[in-house]
Image (tube, rainbow, N blue to C red):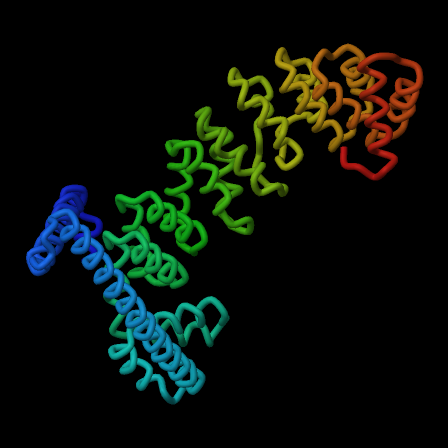
C-alpha cells in the first residue's frame, strides 16, 4: 500500500480510479432506471434512479463510518491495554525475556513503550531499555525503516534510533541523509547533531555552507549548545578564508548567543564581504578576538557602510571603550541613519562616565533627530532598558 501511495505513477492511478468510480456510478443509475420500467417518462425515471442511487451511497457511507468508528475504538482499547501490560512488564527486570517475546507479537506497542521509556529514563535504567530494544524482533525492521518510502515511518525510525549510541543505529540514521524527502533528511541531520558521533557532526557542519538559507538556519538551531565540537568548528571556519563558511560560523555564534572560546582573527573587520563585516561586529561580544578590541571597534565605526557602523556601535555598548566616546557622539549628531545613531546613543548610555553626561546634555541642548535619539536612549536607560 505504501508503494502505491508514494508511487510516481500516482497521478495516472488517481485518474484511472476516478474514471472507474464515475463509470460504476453511471452504470448503477442506468441499472436502477431499467429496473424502474413502470415509470413511463424517461426523465422522471432517471431522476428517481439518480436519487435512489445517491440515497443508497449515503446509507452505505453512514454504515461504513459507524462500523469503522466501532472498530477503531476497539482497536485503540486493545492497543492501550497492550501498552499497559508491556509497561508493567518493563518495571520488573525479571521479565526481560517475556518483553522480548511480546515484542514479536506486539511490535508497534513495544516500540511505543520503548520510545517513551528512552525519552524519560537516564543511566542504567535507560541502558536496560536500549538493550531490550536491540534484542527485540522489531529492531532489525527499525534499522531498515529509515529508508522507507513513507516519510512518516522513516522520521519515526530516525527519531527513535537517534537516541541510541551504537554503530548500527548511527549508520541507519546517516542513511536517512540520502532520503528523497527533505523532511526525512532534516530529521536525520537533527538526530546526528544531537547525538554523540563527533565525526559525523563535523562532516555535517562542514557541509552546512552548501545548503539553502532556510535549511542552514534550521540546522544551526539543531546544534547543541554544550557540544565540544562547536568551538573548533567555529575557529577553523573563521580562519578558512571561505566567505560562506565564515558566515555559517558567525550565524552559529549569533544563534547560540553565548561566549565561544574560538579565536577570531581581527582581519574579519576589514573583510571585502559586507555580510561578513556586519555579522562579525554583531557576534563580536561572543568571540575571543585576536588583537586589540578597541582598534577593531575603531575600524568598524569608520566603515563605509552604515550597517557595519551600527553593529560596531552596538558592540561598543558591550566593551565600553572610553576612548571612543567622541566618535559615538559624532555618530549621534551627524548620522543620517536612525538605527546607526540609536545604537551609538545606547552604547553611550551604558558606558557611563563622560559619555553618559554628554548624552544627557545632547538630549537637552541639541535639536532635530540627534535630540530625539539621545532622549530616547536616556529614557530607555533610566527605565532599565537594554542597550
Give whichever of 56, 166 is nearer the camera. Answer: 56
Q: Is residue 307 left or right of residue 27?
A: right
Give the x, y percent position of residue 117.
44, 72
What residue is shown at x 87% (from left), y 22% (from top)? Answer: 359
On screen, residue 163 above or below 280: below
Residue placed furthest toward the bottom:
94
Which quadrant of the figure has residue 74? Answer: bottom left
Left or right of 266 in this view: 102 = left
* 260 lies above or below 142: above
Quadrant containing the N terminus is: bottom left
At horizontal 27% and vertical 69% (from top left) the residue drawn is: 63
Q: Nearer the viewer, residue 240 or 132?
A: 132
Q: Residue at x 46, y 75 (%)?
A: 124
> Is 108 drawn above or below residue 199 in the view shown?
below
Image location (x, y in percent) of residue 6: 21, 49
Q: Position of residue 50 (x, y in %)?
A: 19, 53
Q: Quadrant of residue 306?
A: top right
Task: State the quadrant of the C terminus.
Answer: top right
Q: Is residue 212 above or below residue 340?
A: below
Judge left or right: residue 228 versus residue 34. Answer: right
Amino acid at each position: 500500500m505504501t508503494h502505491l501511495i508514494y508511487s510516481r505513477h500516482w497521478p495516472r492511478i488517481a485518474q484511472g480510479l476516478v474514471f472507474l468510480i464515475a463509470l460504476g456510478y453511471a452504470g448503477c443509475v442506468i441499472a436502477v432506471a431499467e429496473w424502474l420500467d413502470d415509470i413511463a417518462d424517461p426523465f422522471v425515471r432517471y431522476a428517481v434512479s439518480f436519487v435512489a442511487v445517491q440515497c443508497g451511497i449515503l446509507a452505505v457511507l453512514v454504515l461504513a463510518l459507524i462500523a469503522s468508528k466501532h472498530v477503531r475504538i476497539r482497536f485503540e482499547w486493545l492497543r492501550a491495554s497492550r501498552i499497559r501490560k508491556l509497561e508493567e512488564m518493563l518495571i520488573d527486570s525479571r521479565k526481560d525475556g517475556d518483553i522480548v517475546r511480546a515484542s514479536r507479537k506486539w511490535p508497534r506497542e513495544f516500540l511505543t513503550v520503548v520510545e517513551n521509556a528512552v525519552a524519560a529514563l537516564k543511566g542504567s535504567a535507560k541502558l536496560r531499555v536500549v538493550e531490550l530494544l536491540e534484542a527485540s524482533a522489531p529492531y532489525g525492521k527499525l534499522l531498515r525503516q529509515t529508508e522507507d518510502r513513507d516519510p512518516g515511518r522513516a522520521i519515526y525510525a530516525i527519531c527513535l534510533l537517534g537516541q541510541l549510541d551504537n554503530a548500527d543505529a548511527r549508520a541507519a540514521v546517516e542513511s536517512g541523509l540520502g532520503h528523497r524527502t527533505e523532511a526525512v533528511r532534516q530529521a536525520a541531520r537533527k538526530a546526528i547533531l544531537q547525538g554523540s558521533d563527533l565525526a559525523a557532526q563535523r562532516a555535517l557542519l562542514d557541509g552546512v555552507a552548501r545548503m539553502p538559507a532556510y535549511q542552514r538556519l534550521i540546522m544551526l538551531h539543531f546544534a547543541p549548545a554544550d557540544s565540544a565540537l562547536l568551538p573548533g568548528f567555529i575557529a577553523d571556519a573563521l580562519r578558512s578564508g571561505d566567505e560562506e563558511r565564515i558566515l555559517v560560523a558567525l550565524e552559529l555564534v549569533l544563534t547560540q548567543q553565548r561566549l565561544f572560546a574560538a579565536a577570531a582573527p581581527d582581519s574579519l573587520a576589514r573583510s571585502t564581504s559586507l555580510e561578513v563585516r556586519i555579522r562579525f561586529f554583531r557576534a563580536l561580544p561572543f568571540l575571543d578576538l585576536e588583537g586589540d578590541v578597541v582598534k577593531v571597534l575603531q575600524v568598524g565605526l569608520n566603515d563605509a557602510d552604515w550597517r557595519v557602523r551600527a553593529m560596531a556601535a552596538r558592540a561598543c555598548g558591550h566593551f565600553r571603550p572610553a576612548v571612543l566616546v567622541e566618535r559615538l557622539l559624532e555618530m549621534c549628531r551627524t548620522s543620517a541613519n536612525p538605527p546607526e545613531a540609536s545604537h551609538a546613543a545606547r552604547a553611550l548610555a551604558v558606558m557611563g562616565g563622560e559619555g553618559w553626561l554628554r548624552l544627557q546634555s545632547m538630549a537637552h541642548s541639541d535639536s532635530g533627530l540627534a535630540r530625539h535619539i539621545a532622549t530616547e536612549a536616556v529614557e530607555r536607560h533610566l527605565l532599565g532598558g537594554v542597550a
